[in-house]
Image (cartoon, helix red, strand yellow):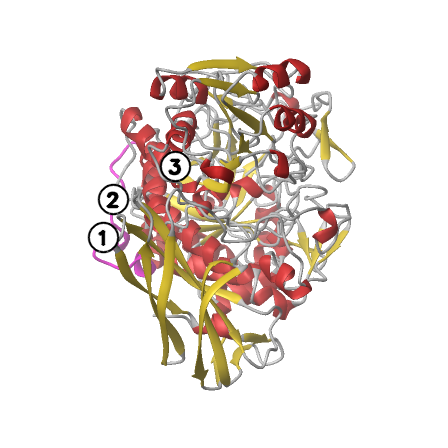
Amino acid sequence: MTFRVAVAPLLLLSGAVSAQVAAPPPPAKQAPDAGMPALAPWDKPPIKGVWSDATQTPDARAKALVAAMTTDEKHTLVFGYFGTDFPISRYIAPKAALEGSAGYVPAILRLGIPAQFQTDAGVGVATQGGAKVKRGRTALPSGLAIAASWDRDVARAGGAMIGDEARRSGFNVMLAGGVNLLREPRNGRNFEYGGEDPVLASSIVAQQVIGIQSNHVVSTIKHYAFNDQETDRNTGNSVIDHSAARVSDLLAFQLAIEQAKPGSIMCSYNRVDGTHACENTWLLTDVLRRDWGFKGYVMSDWGAAHSTVAAATAGLDQDSGFPFDSKPFFGRPLREAIDQGTVKPAQLDLMVERILYGMFAQGLFEHPLQQQPIDMVGHAAVTRAAAEAGTVLLKNARNLLPLTASAKRIAIIGGHADKGVLAGGGSSLVYPAEGNAVPGIAPTFWPGPVMYYPSSPMAEIQRQAPGAVVRYADGNDPAAAAALAKDSDVVIVFATQWAGESFDVAMALDGKQDALIDAIGDANRNTVVVLETGGPVMMPWLDKVGAVLAAWYPGTAGGAAIANVLTGKVNPSGRLPVTFPRGVDQLPDPAVPHSGDVVYREGATVGYKWFDAKAFKPLFPFGYGLSYTQFAGSGLKAGVANGAITARFQMRNTGARAGAAIGQIYVSPVAGGWEAPKRLGGFAKVALAPGASKSASVTVDPRLLATWDEAGQQWRIAGGAYRVMLGTSAADIVQTVTVTVPARTMPATWRAR
C-alpha cells in the first residue's frame, strides 16, 4: 500500500534516483464522495445460514452467503476506504475505521460479515503518517534482511509475531508479503522484498505469510506484478517476454502463493505490456486464476485502480483505499455499470464470493477481533533473533571480528549509532513505542519521517565490553573522525542509506560517507563497517577496511542484534539474497530507473544469473556470507524420481565455534538452453556444533528444470544430462554430480504436491 493522491501529486521525482518533497497541494474544492449505499441499521442477531457452519468448505460458505446478500451489501464488500483522515482531499475516514490505519471495509451486520480492518505491512503494524497518534509496535528487520537469513523458521516466526500484533491491535487484514524480485538495485522498495531469486524469495515470503495467517489474519502477497522501480511507478510500463516472465518474477509469485495460500493478492501500480496491472486480464485472469487456481480475492494497491468495467472484468475484486484513485471506480461507477449492463451482475457476485472465500479460509468469521495487550518484550526477542540471523559478514580480514578483550579503545563513528538504527520509509514504516530516536531529519513527512529505532548499537557494545573505553563521533567532521580512529584499537563505522516508497536511490551510501570511510580506513586498518541499507551498495573503500557487516534495516532490536554479532555472542549465519555489483556498469540497463517503457531485455536473467551469463565478477555474489567458524560441504549425491531431482549432501563444521551453514543446490542442463548457466534449485540451513556434521536434502521442483512454452502454454523439460551443484554461494561451487532427467511437459496448472 502507499499514498497516491488523485487530485495532485505529493512527490516530484527528480532524475532517476532521487526524490524531492513538494509542498502540499491546495485542498480539493469539495470532499470526495464515493457514492456508496448506506446500509440499513441492524440491531438484531445476525441471520444464520449454511455460511454459519464452520464445517462447510470456504467455497460452499461463500457461495451460500452471496446468495443471501442484497445488491447494496455486495457493493459494500468490493469497496474499501482509507482508514486515516486525509486533509489534502478533505477526506474524513469512517468513524469505525481504526485511527492511523491503511484501510477499512464496513461490516454487514445483518449477515454477520465482519468489517475488514487493514494494516500495513511486511515488517509490522504500521501507522500512517497523517495520524495524530502513532501506534507504537514491534518492527521486524526489513524483508531483505529476513531473506538474508535463508531461514524459513525465522521468517515464519517473524510473520506469526507481527500477525499477533495485528490481531491484538484490532486488524484482520495485513498488507504484507512483498515478493517482487530485485531486478533493479536502485529500487527504493527493495528493502520490503525477498531478493533476486524466485526460490529464495518465494520460500521466505511464503513462510512469513503463513505465520501472519496463523493468527486468523488475511495476508496479501504483493505487488503483482513487475513492480520493480518507484520512478514513474503509476504509469511506467514493464515490458517483458512472457516466457521469461514465467520462469522469473511470475514463478516467485506462483511458488509463494502455492505454499502460503494467501487470502488476497494486491495488484501493483505499474502497467504491464501497456495495461495497468489492476486491470490486466493476462495477469489477473489468465495467469492467477486459470493457470494457478487462486481462489482468494485481488485488491488494488491504494490508488492503483484506473477503471471500472475493465478492472472488474479483468479480475479486480476490491477497489481499495478511497480516495486515492482518480474516481471511486467500484463505488457509484460500478453501480452504474451494472445498471447499464457493461458489468454483469454475475461478475459482482464472483467478486464478492472471492472476498468471502478469503475471509472464510482464514477464519475471520469464527475469530472476531478484540484488542488485547501485546507482549512487547517477547516480540522484541523475536525481531532481535531475526536481525541476528539476517546479518551477513562480508569481509573479515585478519579475523578482526568478533571483537576481543584486547580492544580497549573502541571508536564508533556515524549512523547515529549512539541513538539507534535506521528504518525504511513509506507506508511500511512501523512507529516505535518509545518514539523516533533521531527526530527532525528531513523529510519529516511522506515518504518520511526518517526513522531511527531507539536501539543503540553503541550502548549495547558498551554493555558487552565494560572494560573498554567507547567513544563516539557523528562523522560530520571527517578529519576529527579520522583522528579519533587513529587513536583507537578498533573503529566501527555505521554507514547508512535511507530508502523508501515512492522514490529510487543511488546504489551508494548517502551523502559523503564513502569519503568518510576512506579517510577512517587510512587512519586505522582495524576498521569495521556496519551497513544499514535498503539493498546493495558500492564500496570504493573496501580494500582499506578490515571487516564489513550487512545489517540492512535491522528493526526494533537492531542495535542489540548488531552488538551481539560484533562481539561474537552470535555467530553470523546470513547469506546474501542479492548480488552486490561493483558498479552500475555491470547492470543489465545502467540507465534505469527511468520513466516510460522499462524493457526487460535481460528477460529471466536476473541477479546472479546475469553475472553468470556475462562472466562478470561481482563485488559479492548471491548466496555469499562468512562466519566466525568454517564449514565444509561434501558427499553430494543426486537422483531423479517423478521428474524431480533430489540432492543429498553433508555439511560439517570444521572450526571451533557453533554456527549455521547453508547448503545451496544449483542445477543446469549440460546441453545448455537456459537463460543462464545455472539456477538455484533449493537450499538447506544446518546448525552445527564445532566438529559436528549433518546430512541434508533438497528436492528441486520440476518447474525449475523447465522452460516455459508460451505457444503451448506449458512447462517443457528437455531430456538429458543435468548438473547438480553444491555451493556456498552462486560463485563458489564445491561439488558437482550429473543426473539424467527424462523429457517432460507439464500443463500450466501443474503444481508440486
- In the picture, measured across the screen, residue 669 lies left or right of residue 690, that is right
Q: Nearer the viewer, residue 50 or 290?
A: 290
Mark 1 belongs to which amino acid?
Answer: Ala
Numbered range of the magenta stretch: 41-61
Whether residue 349 is visible to the viewer of this picture, yes or no, is no
Q: Which residue is mark 3?
A: 388
Mark 3 belongs to which amino acid?
Answer: Glu
Q: Which mark is residue 590?
A: none
Residue at 37% across / 75% down in the picture? 638
The answer for how far apart the CA atoms under marks 3 and 2 are is: 36 Å
Residue 33 place in picture, x, y as percent: 60, 32
Q: Main secondary structure of the magenta part?
A: loop
* 218 in relation to 448, above or below: below
Q: Which residue is mark 2?
A: 366
**C-beta proximity under 8 Å, tags 2 and 1:** yes
What kind of element bears circle 2? Answer: loop
Disc 2: CA contacts within 10 A as few (<14), some (14-19) or many (>=20): some
- In the picture, measured across the screen, residue 309 lies left or right of residue 135, that is right
